[in-house]
Image (cartoon, rainbow, N blue to C red):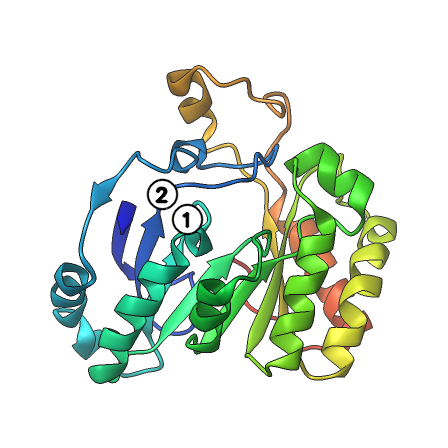
Amino acid sequence: MIVHSIESLAALDGEGLRYAIFLAGCPMRCAYCHNPDTWNPRAGTEYTPEELLQKIKRYKPYFSAGGGVTFGGGEPLLQAGEIVRLGRLLAGDNISYTIDTSGCVELDGDVRAALRGAGLVICDLKFPDAQTFKKYTGGDFSRVLKFFDFLATEKIRTWARTVIVPGINDQKEDLVRYIEVLRPYVDAGAVEKYQLLGFHTMGFFKYERLGIKNRLENTPTMPAERLAELQKYVNSRLLLPTPALL
């Protein structure tokens, strides 16, 4: 397993306190990405599942209030087979795991197994249609819909997330289209929470350091007050409780 970085007591990557493992590699090139240093699948430290289990177990006392392990990235499901192997070890110690994913991977056997083993899946809905999705991420929107369909069919607990970027998707009329995509899954009980995340500029220095063009270099941080307003709007439309803003 190639690990980009680890956050031992993360509070924003699922329920409770988390041991967040950010895996290296990502097939997406999202315009608003704040971690372009995770794109390279070899840019990290290699661990065996057994080595990671020993590191994780030190923090087990902090997981009593619903916490556990979160696999993020990058795109963690590029290493789905390793997640499955570590997941089996975690289950032996009664530790659950969450997957934080773009949903833009093929649903092969390892991916399906990793998702079925998860206590929660946090899946991005980056953009609500194929054209805009391709423009700002380079990815295939149809894969995301298949991903949500699989999670719903398998009755896997799911949260959806969207990054709100000033000037791109920060108007209520923009969010109507996201709501239309999510409504069938929410109505079926498949998506239990929808979180809006505010675009920020804290990762801009990474683009300069890596020599990568920053497509949004002149875009400001998303105002917290406006984000809160939009969060209340989408959740009222979807009849969901308003989550704490991240």
- Residue 152 place in picture, x, y as percent: 66, 77
Q: Is residue 161 left or right of residue 132?
A: left
Pointer 2 with pointer 1, Cβ within 8 A: yes
Out of 43 and 120, give the one closest to the viewer: 43
Using the image, determine if residue 86 lies above or below residue 5.
below
Please identify the quarter of the rendering in which residue 42 is found: top left
Of the residues shown, which amino acid type is indicated by label 1? Gly
Residue at 73 percent across and 42 percent down: it is 133
Q: Which residue is mark 1?
A: 73
- Element assignment for label 1: loop
Q: Residue at x 55, y 79 (%)?
A: 156
Furthest toward the right, the residue is 173
- Residue that appears at 45% across and 32% down: 36
Element at label 2 = loop
x and y percentages locating residue 28 in the rendered image: 56, 39
Mark 2 or 1 closer to N-term?
Answer: 2
Q: Which residue is mark 2?
A: 24
Q: Give the residue at x 31% y 60%.
A: 82
- Residue type at mark 2 is Ala
**Snapshot quadrant of residue 135:** top right
